[in-house]
Image (cartoon, helix red, strand yellow):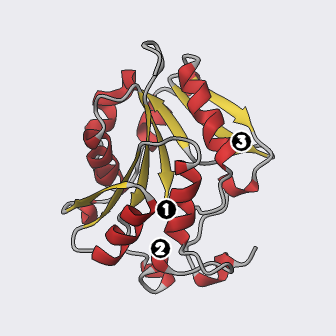
Amino acid sequence: MARNQKVIAAILLAAGAGRRFGGDKLLHPLEDGVAIAAHAARNLLAATSEVIAVVRWGDFPLYDMLEQEGCQVTMFQGASRGMGASLAHGIAQARSADGWVVALADMPRIAPETIKKMIAALEEGASIAAPVYKGERGHPVAFASSLRDELLALDGDQGARAVVEEHRDAVKLIECDDPGVLHDIDRKSDIVD
């Protein structure tokens, strides 16, 4: 690896309870028989080799599956505090990285090429990068290491929204022909293609 090459880690947030889905959402198979979270993990791993997945404490089936996919998996006891707390925990696992791409495990249709564009934006000096599809901002969102302390301080269920809002003038929006950046699965009816 070249000395000046940046290390961009992916954080896969997989610690939600999936209540609206009816539980075990991330283990639910898509039409090809592969679990929702496995798809999300594979998309990230196709773009970067360092993927940290954050799962709820005691969720061994999801932990095992994501570990088998190739993720570094961490169980988080504070997952019930919300997405912000889970994100801060994930960032802490890769605090020495030069940046992070934050993805949601219930968004299994994001193209690896889109993730690579977010990583490239950080490597080119962006503080925050986000994909845009047909005028709507989506996921994953990438953050440079200059925002480490703000990300580590997150708590509650707002995720990194406050950080993005605080630095909205620094957000590099990247047009993508990828409807997957907007498609999350909250209910079983969201699985249809």
Disc tally is 3
How many other residues sit within 10 Å of disc 2, few (<14), some (14-19) or many (≥20)? many
Q: CB under 8 Å between callouts 1 and 2?
A: yes
Disc nearest the viewer among 3 and 1: 1
The dot on residue 132 is 3
Disc nearest the viewer among 3 and 2: 2
How many other residues sit within 10 Å of disc 1, few (<14), some (14-19) or many (≥20)? many
84 or 68, nearer to the observer:
68
Reply above or below: 178 against 146. below
Residue type pointed to by label 2: Leu
Where residue 115 sits, quadrant-wise, is: top right
Whole-number angstrom distance, CA of label 1 to CA of label 2: 7 Å
Reply above or below: 129 against 193. above
Reply above or below: 177 against 63. above
Residue at image coords 49%, 57%: 104
Where is residue 61? Give x, y as percent.
Answer: 34, 77
Where is residue 134? Give x, y as percent.
Answer: 81, 46
Q: CB under 8 Å between callouts 3 and 1?
A: no
Where is residue 154? Give x, y as percent.
Answer: 30, 43
| Residue at the far left in the pictured view | 77
The dot on residue 105 is 1
Residue corresponding to mark 2:
26
Residue at image coords 25%, 40%: 92
| Residue at the far bottom in the pictured view | 22
95 or 153, nearer to the observer:
95
